[in-house]
Image: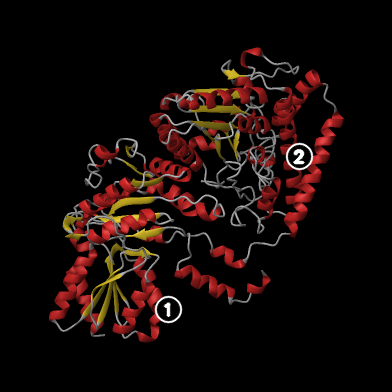
């Protein structure tokens, strides 16, 4: 199902039969192909279309812009740290910052997030401390997952973010069940599940949407259609005209949104939260965006994707688009960007310093938490390991 | 005390716990109005309503995935999978998610379910209504596995399973759902998980078994007694964590062990039990440990009584082991 760890693939020879032509459907700009059904707010000149304007306050836009810049810079820095061999892995969100931060921002304090593995920005925005995230990247003793999972597989109860796992789509049905339980207890909360376009091919997507429809659960099914499931383009995931249309079969409204438009993402997610809160059930949101990086630090997209394909999407860079809004409305400046950069660099440097000095989890911690209390067979295995030759290294 | 069969005893446990703990919900295919295809949940829908006894879409993956979400929110779901043979669409959710939630989240998100499912052959159910996949769950770190053999244990073990902090696979041997009858204590009691029971004491050979095969083992043990072989029979009740002390104490006494289970032989739970006996009681053994099990074939329809390790196959194994 999941293949987070891919061997580095070599670029294909020029005349390979596998080479993808630039005219291939994958090269097309999905936003060009998409019709008027795509919700857009932020215009090219930085002005807003009043029809779907979420009416964000100045402070909110600035805060969200800072989160987007911080997320992008963290991606860059963590990738660099991975290349230096100091962490094993990173899976980022380059190009998808508006979809991720806009949707997380639109939730209310009581709402919950069921993450895929590409939304660390959302978890941070919702309150996961940066130090805990960096601890997870290093898998040290302070990692919320206690070094038991790969980097970017965090969890944070204080941020109301559940636990990241690698299998694709499993969080969708769980998010539906979680919201369903809240509904049974008459609690007013919405649950947002993130997943990619690839996950729409999983049985869990079908199971989750079907249960969400039948039981009218307060779930926001947020599909980041970023064009790629590792090397497989969107066209190989479905023959349907987009993913939002799939909601119809489950009795769930589907909404398509320009996923690189922060304002539009906030608007459609807020609408979905409001629907859930009114007891009207789930919403499937398809955010059209683009994965500008490889799948992860273990992937080399040059093997399957010409650089030229990125150009139209770079022109739609979600961070640059908000910057244009800020230029137009608040007289933003490069100096203020530099301030954000200096700030996140200082925070990250401090967090990395602490994380690198924090020891790995204790040897015996490997046996804790399998069950609430370790049964005899785990005690026996633990004790044998502790008597063994490597016990003193920890 | 009242006389009950397994179906009634499990129903009694569910009703009792649902009255006691409002977090407990039952969900699955046909569990509502009709009370389950084996009628185990009969009457619960009328008493607790459709928000606590929930007929779901026909989707095992959806049932278990949604139940995990419910558990994360604080409910105590007791989903039913109609037959253990149909559990595999939910295998990913059970193995990759349920079993690992507590561990992978450093304890922040323990996810606890009791998954009830009828197991085993002997009802002319063919490939897909007869299998015993318990070893495939024991092999997954983080799951407890239970398989009762009688009504009183079934009730007490289910109550213990629902109150246990860990996820529990609760396998109900459908062959004896109605055939196994017995006195069941009234009201609330538990049978602790992880504790086996010596059902028949003996000094010559130890049988380790569980579920419906307990009765075949007892039958074989009685026949062996007629030939001068005194057999001790252990009903594991909880398969995992295994009550290793009871098994090893018995084998140290008898020096001979026969494991009886319905599942295929290779990599069945019997293989693990025999390995543990070898590790922990090797110098006490007077004969090689023996497994009497289902075969490494799909579960057959017409020949099911040849496939199952019934008394006629257990007896020769007991005698050979005793006379080794």
Quarter of image, res A146 = bottom right
User: Whole-percent x and y of residue B91?
Assistant: 41, 49
Is A166 left, or right, of B283 in this rendering?
Answer: right
State the mark number for residue A73.
Answer: 2
A357, above or below A123, in the image: below
Label ID, residue B279? 1
- Name which residue lies at 66% across and 35% down: A291
Residue at point 57%, 73% (across, down): A385
Residue A166 versus residue A211 in the image, above or below: below
Is residue A23 shown to the viewer in this render? yes
Q: Chain of mark 2?
A: A
Front-lying residue, A276 or B55: A276
Within 10 Å of the Cα at label 2, are there few (<14), some (14-19), or many (20+) other Cα atoms?
Answer: some
Q: Secondary structure at mark 2?
A: helix
In what quadrant of the picture does the C terminus of chain A appear?
Answer: bottom right
- The image position of residue B185, as x and y in percent, is 22, 59
Find residue A82 and report its horizontal and vertical position in percent.
73, 51
Which picture quadrant has residue B134?
A: bottom left
Q: Residue at x 51, y 25 (%)?
A: A244
Asked whether A204 or A354 is in front, the reply is A354
Instruction: Pinpoint residue A175: horizontal percent, then vertical percent.
Output: 49, 38
Specify the farthest residue to the left.
B226
Q: Are marks 2 and 1 in contact (CB under 8 Å)?
A: no
Tell me the residue at 77%/25% (across/down): A323
Question: Left of A322 or right of it: where is A362?
Answer: left
Q: Residue furthest right?
A: A335
| A24 horizontally vs A316: left or right | left
Q: Helix, strand or loop at disc 1?
A: helix
Q: Residues within 10 Å of mark 1 (few under 14, many from 20)?
A: few
Toward the viewer: B256 or B53? B53
Q: Which mark is residue B250?
A: none
């Amino acid at each position: 199902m999941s293949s987070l760890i891919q061997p580095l693939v070599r670029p294909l020879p020029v005349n390979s039969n596998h080479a993808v032509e630039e005219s291939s459907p994958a090269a097309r700009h999905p936003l060009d192909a998409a019709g008027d059904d795509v919700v857009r707010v932020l215009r090219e000149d930085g002005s807003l279309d009043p029809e779907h304007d979420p009416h964000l306050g100045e402070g909110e836009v600035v805060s969200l812009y800072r989160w987007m810049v911080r997320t992008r810079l963290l991606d860059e820095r963590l990738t660099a740290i991975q290349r230096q061999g100091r962490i094993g892995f990173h899976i980022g969100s380059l190009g998808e910052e508006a979809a991720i931060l806009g949707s997380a921002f639109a939730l209310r304090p009581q709402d919950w997030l069921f993450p895929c593995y590409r939304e660390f920005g959302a978890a941070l925005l919702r309150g996961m401390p940066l130090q805990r995230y960096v601890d997870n990247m290093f898998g040290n003793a302070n990692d919320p997952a206690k070094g038991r999972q790969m980097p970017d597989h965090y969890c944070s109860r204080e941020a109301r973010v559940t636990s990241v796992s690698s299998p694709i789509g499993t969080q969708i049905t769980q998010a539906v069940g979680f919201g369903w339980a809240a509904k049974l207890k008459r609690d007013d909360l919405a649950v947002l599940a993130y997943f990619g376009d690839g996950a729409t091919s999983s049985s869990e997507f079908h199971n989750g949407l079907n249960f969400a429809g039948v039981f009218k659960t307060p779930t926001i099914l947020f599909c980041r259609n970023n064009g790629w499931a590792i090397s497989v383009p969107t066209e190989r995931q479905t023959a349907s005209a987009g993913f939002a249309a799939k909601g119809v079969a489950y009795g769930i409204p589907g909404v398509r949104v320009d996923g690189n438009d922060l304002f539009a993402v906030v608007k459609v997610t807020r609408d979905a939260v409001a629907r859930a809160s009114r007891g009207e059930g789930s919403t499937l949101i398809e955010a059209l965006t683009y994965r500008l990086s490889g799948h992860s630090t273990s992937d080399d997209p040059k093997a399957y994707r010409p650089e030229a394909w990125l150009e139209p999407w770079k022109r739609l860079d979600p961070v640059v688009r908000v910057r244009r809004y800020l230029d137009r409305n608040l007289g933003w400046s490069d100096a203020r960007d530099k301030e954000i950069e200096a700030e996140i660099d200082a925070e990250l440097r401090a967090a990395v310093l602490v994380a690198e000095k924090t020891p790995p989890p204790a040897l015996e911690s490997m046996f804790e938490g399998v069950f609430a209390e370790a049964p005899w067979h785990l005690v026996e295995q633990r004790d044998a390991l502790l008597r063994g030759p490597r016990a003193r290294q920890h | 005390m009242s006389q009950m069969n397994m179906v009634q005893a499990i129903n009694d446990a569910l009703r009792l716990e649902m009255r006691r703990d409002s977090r407990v919900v039952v969900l699955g295919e046909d569990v509502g109005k009709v009370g389950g295809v084996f009628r185990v949940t009969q009457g619960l829908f009328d008493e607790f309503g459709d928000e606590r006894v929930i007929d779901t879409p026909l989707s095992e993956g959806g049932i278990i995935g949604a139940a995990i979400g419910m558990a994360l929110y604080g409910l105590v779901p007791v989903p039913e999978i109609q037959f253990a043979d149909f559990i595999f669409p939910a295998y990913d959710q059970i193995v990759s998610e349920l079993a690992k939630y507590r561990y992978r989240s450093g304890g922040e998100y323990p996810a606890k379910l009791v998954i009830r499912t009828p197991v085993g052959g002997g009802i002319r159910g063919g490939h897909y209504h007869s299998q015993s996949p318990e070893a495939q769950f024991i092999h997954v770190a983080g799951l407890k596995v239970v398989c009762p053999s009688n009504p009183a244990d079934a009730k007490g073990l289910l109550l213990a399973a629902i109150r246990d902090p860990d996820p529990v696979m609760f396998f109900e041997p459908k062959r004896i759902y109605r055939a196994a009858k017995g006195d069941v204590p009234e009201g609330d009691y538990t049978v602790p998980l992880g504790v086996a029971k010596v059902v028949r004491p003996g000094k010559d050979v130890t049988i380790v078994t569980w579920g419906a095969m307990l009765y075949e083992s007892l039958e074989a043990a009685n026949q062996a007694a007629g030939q001068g072989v005194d057999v001790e029979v252990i009903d594991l009740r909880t398969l995992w964590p295994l009550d290793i002390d009871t098994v090893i104490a018995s084998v140290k006494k008898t020096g001979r062990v026969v494991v009886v289970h319905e599942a295929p032989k290779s990599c069945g739970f019997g293989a693990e039990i025999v390995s543990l006996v070898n590790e922990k009681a090797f110098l006490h053994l007077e004969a090689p440990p023996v497994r009497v099990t289902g075969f490494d074939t799909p579960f057959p329809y017409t020949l099911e009584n040849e496939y199952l390790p019934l008394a006629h196959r257990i007896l020769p194994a007991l005698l050979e082991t005793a006379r080794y």
